[in-house]
Image: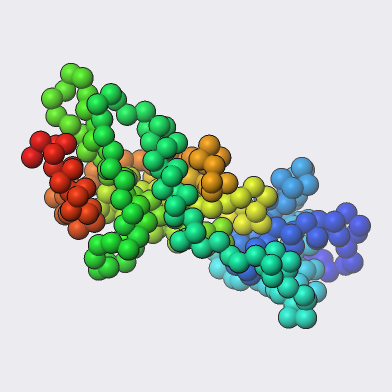
Amino acid sequence: MDQSPLRSEDMMLDEQMLSLLPDDGAPVLNRMVRLSLSRTVERRVTQQEYFKIRDQLIADGKIGRARGPGGQVYLIQDPDDPPHPLISQTLPITEADLMPFLENYLETAFQTGLDLPSGSHFILEDTSQRGPRRGQWARPDFILVTLLRYRFQPQKQLDLHAFELKTENGCNVQAVHEALAQTRFTHYGHLVWHLPENSPHTVRLEDIRAQCISHGVGLILMREPGDPESYEILVDARRKNTPLAIVDGFLEARLTDENQKRLARLLGV
């Protein structure tokens, strides 16, 4: 690659590229960084431009290179740099901090968006600390049971949704597979990602979105945790044909006794 000095426009792209990489040093695919860079500068950044800038940043010791399919780059933190003001003054927002906000969203805007038929019911359960730990990724943060009643059909349809919550810097492609794995026991799997507007972690969004579409996992962006109207359903979850016996056993292990009795009453059993 050409290692000649960068032109002034290249230097602007240099700084833009650095600003797009996550502060925590998480690696990002080259194609995703180039796409985000193009959007930031509002023009197409060619592969030749991108790799020239990338290679110069590597030579300058500002970013690192992770090899593999597609290639990845990551930000190298200078130990002599002063702490970032937001990091030094603000504690990270944890999943525990976000759980009450997600619960409120699921009870309000999400439920309304389901547009359930008249006479339907829903039951929401925090399962982040409930149920067996056996099996990898077998414990969603929330489950939502919807019981649909249709006017001209005597039977009721039970749908089970699972929600996996991730913090701003805690979401990656593995999180998609975590939400997908939960559909072994449920009908729908959703990944909820706290991603504020203008977050540097937005560089991961297209890759995560593509994975969600590929696997039928729903993707919900939590923009402003306290404002249910700010949440964005970026990808709709596809229903899985999970065996009834597995769903039944999962509900028995996760629902509280009170909610099990309530569900039994609603089903007339």
User: Measuring 27% from the left and 49% from the top, which residue is drawn there?
Assistant: 186
Location of residue 135 in the rendering, given as x and y in whole percent from the top left corner: 27, 67
Asked where in the image residue 175 lies, by quadrant, the reply is bottom left
* Left or right for 32, reference 179: right
Location of residue 249 in the rendering, given as x and y in whole percent from the top left corner: 16, 54
* Left or right for 152, reference 27: left
Q: Is residue 233 above or below residue 168?
A: above
For the view shown, which residue lies furthest in the left direction?
269
Q: What colouring method underlies this structural image?
A: rainbow
Location of residue 248 in the rendering, given as x and y in whole percent from the top left corner: 16, 49
Location of residue 143 in the rendering, given as x and y in whole percent from the top left corner: 32, 49
For the view shown, which residue lies furthest in the front direction?
258
Q: Is residue 143 above or below residue 133?
A: above
Please indicate, yes or no, whether residue 4 appears anywhere in the rendered image: yes
User: Measuring 80% from the left and 60% from the top, which residue is drawn there?
Assistant: 15
For the view shown, which residue lies furthest in the bottom direction?
80
Please indicate, yes or no, whether residue 206 appears anywhere in the rendered image: no
* Left or right for 228, reference 137: right
Quadrant of image for the C terminus: top left
| Residue nearest the viewer, comparing 259 with 79 | 259
User: Measuring 83% from the left and 69% from the top, which residue is drawn there?
Assistant: 3
